[in-house]
Image: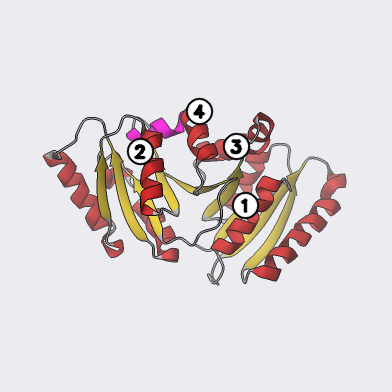
Amino acid sequence: MTTVIVPVDFSPVSIHTARYAAQLLVGHYGVNILLYHSYAKSSEEMTVIESLEELRKELLATCIVQIEILAQEEDNFVDGLQRAVRHRKADLVIMGISGKSALKKVLFGSNTLKMVDTKVCPIMIIPEQASFQQVHNVMLTSDFKDTIKTTPSVPIKDFLGVFNPKLHVVNVDKDHYISLTANYEKEKQHLAQMFEEYHPEFYFMRLYDVDEALNLFAQDKGIDLLIVIRRDESFIQKLFKPSHTKALSYQSKIPILVMHE
């Protein structure tokens, strides 16, 4: 991981996200943070650059990280951000999301969810209520279906390699309870081999409320980051239907890293 883009619209949510990203990447000297803002009128350029530079100086005053700024005139925020990701070959975008008001959800939250849909690169969502924690415990959710083909192991391990956390692999399913099927055991072994350097621990929970199950597990294990894999017709897709995505992202107090199959 070498380039991380942090979009900033100068709202409290985005400033909180920028501060979180800077703290997260302290000491990772090979990683460059790019503070990004797109503006609608060319007359705004100098003001935007000055504001980005002020934020950059604030972050550098407390965090030893590499930070650049990028301001671009764009008609569409998401299109412009996708272009920046491709041109800078970004490995990750870190974006905020708000749970306070419908207005904030529309202005910044909706763009975050639209970026998730683009599949242009992994997106880390920082909830407004998230207080910074070092990444020591990571939860990876899996539906345990065709894991070799559907688990993006390379980008996941690229991220895990930066922080070397303890890995907890979690499946929530209403159909099994006491014993696992032979197929589940096979998929478990595939994942164990895939992430063997992180000595993964596996958990199987039989709960009907997926959001509740994941939140309870996160509290119990002190999870610092949740990784979800966005794929069609899968267990985890339930979390990314409009209502579920908003419920999980807006209510969660831990960052959510979205990977694509």
Return the disc, 3 or 4, that comes first in the chain's sequence.
3
The residue segment tinted magenta is: 235-241
- Is mark 4 in CB contact (under 8 Å) with mark 1? no
Q: Which residue is mark 1?
A: 17
Residue 40 versus residue 104: which sits nearer the camera?
Answer: 104
* Res. 231 visible in picture: no
Label 4 residue SS: helix
Going by the numbered disc 1, the residue's amino acid type is: Thr
> Residue 26's x, y, as percent?
56, 68
Left or right placement of residue 197 versus residue 64 in this view: left
> Residue 50's x, y, as percent?
82, 58
Residue 128 versus residue 148: which sits nearer the camera?
Answer: 128
* Res. 194 visible in picture: yes
Going by the numbered disc 3, the residue's amino acid type is: Gly
Residue depth check, mark 4 versus mark 2: number of the one nearer the observer: 2
Q: CA distance from mark 3 to mark 4?
A: 14 Å
Q: Which residue is mark 2?
A: 213
Q: Could you tell me which quadrant the C terminus lies in?
A: top left
Image quarter of residue 211: top left
Q: CA distance from mark 4 to mark 2?
A: 19 Å
Q: CA distance from mark 1 to mark 3?
A: 14 Å
Image quarter of residue 250: top right
Q: CA distance from mark 3 to mark 2?
A: 20 Å
Left or right placement of residue 133 versus residue 15 in this view: left
Dot 3 alpha-carbon crowd within 10 angstroms: few under 14, some 14 to 19, many 20 or more: some
Q: Which residue is mark 4?
A: 242
Going by the numbered disc 4, the residue's amino acid type is: Pro
Residue depth check, mark 3 versus mark 4: number of the one nearer the observer: 3
Above/below status of 161 relative to 41:
below
